[in-house]
Amino acid sequence: MAKFGYIMTAPGYSDFEADEKWMVEFGCMEIVKEELSGHDGMRSLWDSLIGRLQFGDTIVIPKLSNALKGARQLVFFLELCRINNIRLISIHDRIDSKDELFPDCKTSDVLTAIALLPKEANAIRKTDRHVIKVRKQISEISRKAVGKAERNRKVINMYQQGFSIDDIFAESGFKSRSSVFRVLNDANIELNRGNTRGPLGPRKKKGENNDEKEEE
């Protein structure tokens, strides 16, 4: 009769170390740790663990919602536990199917944990999807930033190596030549050849040149 622990390290789960310590002190011979992948149906380590349970074994989980996806899965799991005399311990729900660890736990507490299971499990899935979305956005922003930095570095290197502005513009992928000059000026590169020498000054507003001529 072996003791197993299972922890799903979902987003927002902050009691990982405390729960693992609890399981170790309780005598779990193996603690399975699985990271929520974002695919609701993919909990391969949990499925594998359930398949390895034998008659009379004990399984310890942090909460019902940490291991189970909803009420339907709970029903099948409880039936498996009943048929195979498997002891279920849920630490934070204070549930022990052998009625030894949590003597102050009442039937109403168990029913509340079961009733909250769908809501808590859904909240975990929503949080996970949000985290995945944010990570994806950060990754996309990072790729764009790296691409921009590499392009700017290429423009600067080409200018310093003596390439013409036309050649640099053709290789840069910019839509206008002014972008090439902007990169060079932002990097404080001295423009020392061609029609443009030195940093580009601010553009004059339309009609400004005519006003200067009239004043003359």
Image: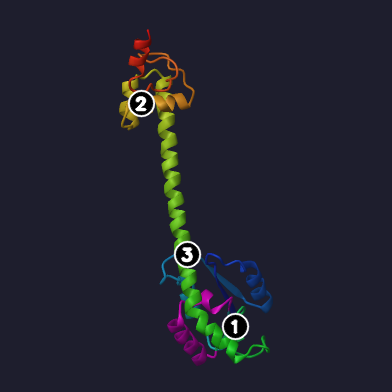
Q: Is residue 37 visible?
A: no
> Is 47 on the left or on the right of 172, as rendered?
right
Foreground mark, 2 or 3? 2
Majority secondary structure of magenta residues: helix
Of the numbered discs 2 and 1, the one sitting upstream in the chain is 1
**Inter-mark Cα distance, 1 to 3:** 25 Å
The mark found on residue 178 in the picture is 2
Residue 88 falls in image quadrant:
bottom right
Q: Is residue 178 above or below residue 210?
A: below
The mark found on residue 89 in the picture is 1
Please tell me which residue lies in front, 204 or 56.
204
Q: Amino acid at mark 2?
A: Ser
Please tell me which residue lies in front, 215 or 135.
215
Foreground mark, 2 or 1? 2
**Looking at the figure, which quarter contains the N terminus?**
bottom right
Residue 16 falls in image quadrant:
bottom right
The mark found on residue 162 in the picture is none
Span colored in magenta: 61-85
